[in-house]
Image (cartoon, rainbow, N blue to C red):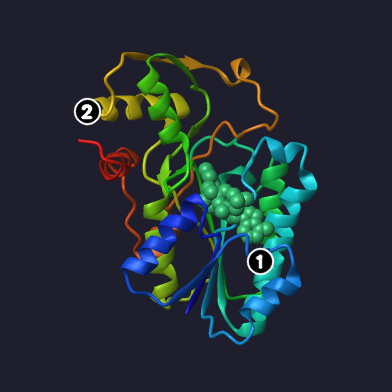
Amino acid sequence: MIWLVGNRGQLGADMEKLLRDGNVAFIASDLEVDITDGRAVERFSSHKKIKWIINCAAYTAVDRAETEREKAFSINSTGAYNLAAAAKKTGAGIVYISTDYVFDGDREGEYTEEDAPNPVSVYGKSKLEGETHTRDTTDKHYIIRTAWLYGGKRGNFVSTMLSLFKKGGEVRVVSDQYGSPTWTKDLAAAVLRIVESGAGGFGVYHYSSEGRTSWYGFAREIHEQGTVLGMLDKKSAVVPITTADYPTAAKRPHNSCLSKERIRKTFGVEIPRWQDSLKNYLLGRGGG
Ligand SMILES: NC(=O)c1ccc[n+]([C@@H]2O[C@H](COP(=O)([O-])OP(=O)(O)OC[C@H]3O[C@@H](n4cnc5c(N)ncnc54)[C@H](OP(=O)(O)O)[C@@H]3O)[C@@H](O)[C@H]2O)c1
């Protein structure tokens, strides 16, 4: 049985749907099992036949983390430790979802799993510590770094852009940060494939969609596809701005592109182009 942790988040919601649709045996929890509370985690996991823990729970408010350092570390680091300790104790394997924000973004080209992390935000530091705890606590772990997620049942970048475009007018979007928009449904499928593969090969893997764009390029594509699919009827202009034009509390990597060679070679995971996944996501939201 799988214990899916954080099932009300973006990724957790799509992971839950995939497990349900595939008739995979699982139990799921979110805030009702507080992962920062080691005893609560132990109580919940003992006497259950858990084979895998998929840890999708996180503190993801990147800017707020700069002033809520303790909370961010408690969930992303201590929470990760508690779950990894429960995995070790019950003999389960664990998946820890991590982030491109463990890198500083100064590299040209794609980051590989061999590149040295150097987080430049509290969020990135707390996630890196979560990786370290997971790795140091149990050998049977997969750390999957991903980037620029959208999906699930709550709001996300795509839904925010669509609602701005529905109002019409000018939408200003940062054009000098680069990465790969990634649909949580694709990532969930990759995670399930890995845990079901029985292939071993524990360690760190990168997963994001194929292709590279900026937030501005992503917004333009949402606008274009939304228009083609008949989801937008007002005129909007997407205007490129720089990171300096849009100051935020947390520093973000300029380059978030991840190399997917390792995950592709080890598990045969197919990686869609980000534009194709966006289209499928929009169609699922009632576009067309
Ligand atoms: N979003 C991105 O663009 C992105 C990019 C790269 C990597 N990631 C990583 O991918 C993973 C999934 O991200 P996501 O966007 O799906 O996250 P999310 O939507 O913020 O979901 C995280 C879930 O964890 C829950 N949670 C928070 N504290 C908890 C606690 N103490 N105990 C149990 N559950 C708790 C949250 O509840 P509340 O929301 O009610 O607090 C939420 O339901 C995370 O590890 C994240 O770091 C995300």
Q: Amino acid at mark 1?
A: Thr
User: Is 59 situated above or below 174?
Assistant: below
For marks 2 and 1, the one nearer the N-term is 1
Residue at 46% over, 35% down: 157
Q: Farthest front residue? A: 32
Judging by the rendered image, the residue that carries numbered circle 2 is 230
Which SS class for mark 2?
A: loop
Classify 191 as above or below 128: below
Q: Position of residue 258 (x, y in %)?
A: 48, 46
Q: Secondary structure at mark 1?
A: helix
The reply to whether residue 98 is in sight is: no
Q: Which residue is mark 1?
A: 134
Left or right, residue 91 beside residue 281:
right
Residue 95 or 178: which is nearer the viewer? 95
The x and y percentages for residue 59 are 65, 49
Q: Is residue 210 above or below residue 80?
A: above
Characterize the local packing of mark 2: few (<14), some (14-19) or many (20 or more) Cα atoms within 10 angstroms: few
At 33% from the left edge and 25% from the top edge, which residue is drawn? 223
